[in-house]
Amino acid sequence: MRIRIDVGYDGTDFAGWARQPGQRTVCEVVEEHLATILRVPVRLTVAGRTDAGVHASGQVAHFDVVDEVLDARSIAGEPANLVRRLAKMLPDDVRVKSATRVSGDFDARFSALRRHYVYRLTDALFGAEPTSARTTAEWNRPLDVDLMNAASEKLLGLNDFAAFCRRREGATTIRDLQRFTWERDADGVLIGRVSADAFCWSMVRSLVGAVASVGDSRRSVQWCADLLDERSRSAQVPVAQARGLCLVGVDYPNDTELAARNEITRDVRSPSSGCCS
């Protein structure tokens, strides 16, 4: 049986999603608590391996387990009962929000059509509000939202985002950036919304850093567009703070289209490619 879980977490005190020796990670915490309940080892496959300090409200993962285990572990064969059990065991900064049976063709990583992120950024002189400081990044110059949207629009589409990605051997940097917009909320915080088929390591934070450099008038819109011609990580692109970034959702096709989607994705991303998604 394949089980999909939807996960939310405050990434402040985690060293990212992926297991790392001697580090507290989201994957390790969730896997260990699932294993405690099911009394068998659990290995999660995730939609997007978020970095240290990055948050999620719509992370997706899956794991496989035999029917007999679910039937025998006080959850009456119903995966949804894991939510209640885990809520009593997990630390306050991570929650499994749903658990459902899915098709064997479902793959949290390879079946995904696109990932959606939100980035919170303040240019207030005093910095972030204390009540939201863990989820809001700071920029120390005034930002022009119109300039940021103009720069963001130049980056949309299927492009090589090598200038915005930390290089990983064997990983492609070609991505389809489908949405990149900015607006100010009622409190004056800039809200960036970013969607793509997948993201390279540090790509979203680098995109934010680049367009913010345009928004504070240190760089031009054309400079931002010209970065797409680069074929390696650009030292001119600042990486925005992790704390402003949150994975808010992952889109998947209908069950009948899952297998085909898996094959398409695997054509361009190997299991060991190292990209965060």
Image (spheres, helix red, strand yellow):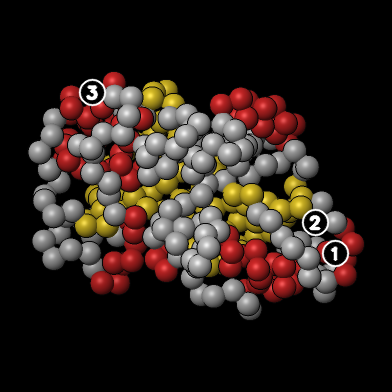
Q: Which residue is mark 2?
A: 65
- What's the residue type where badge 2 is placed? Val
Q: Residue at x 75, y 47 (%)?
A: 102
Q: Residue 160 placed where, x, y %?
A: 38, 25
Residue 137 image position (x, y, % from top left): 27, 57
Disc 3/disc 1 C-alpha distance (Å): 55 Å
Quarter of the image holding residue 211? top left
The residue that label 3 is drawn on is 226
Image quadrant assignment for residue 200: top left
Question: From the viewer's perspective, is 229 left or right of 246?
Answer: left
Q: Earlier in the sequence, mark 2 or mark 3?
A: 2
Do we see residue 48 in this rendering? Answer: yes
Q: Residues within 10 Å of mark 1 (few under 14, many from 20)?
A: some
Determine the secondary structure under disc 1. Answer: helix
The answer, for residue 10, to whether it is visible in the render is no
Do the residues bearing badges 1 and 2 touch, measured as CB atoms within 8 Å?
yes
Work out whether mark 3 precedes mark 1 in sequence or the reverse, and give the earlier one.
Answer: 1
- Identify residue type, mark 1: Val
Q: Is residue 43 above or below residue 132?
A: above
Residue at position x 29%, y 21% from top? 229
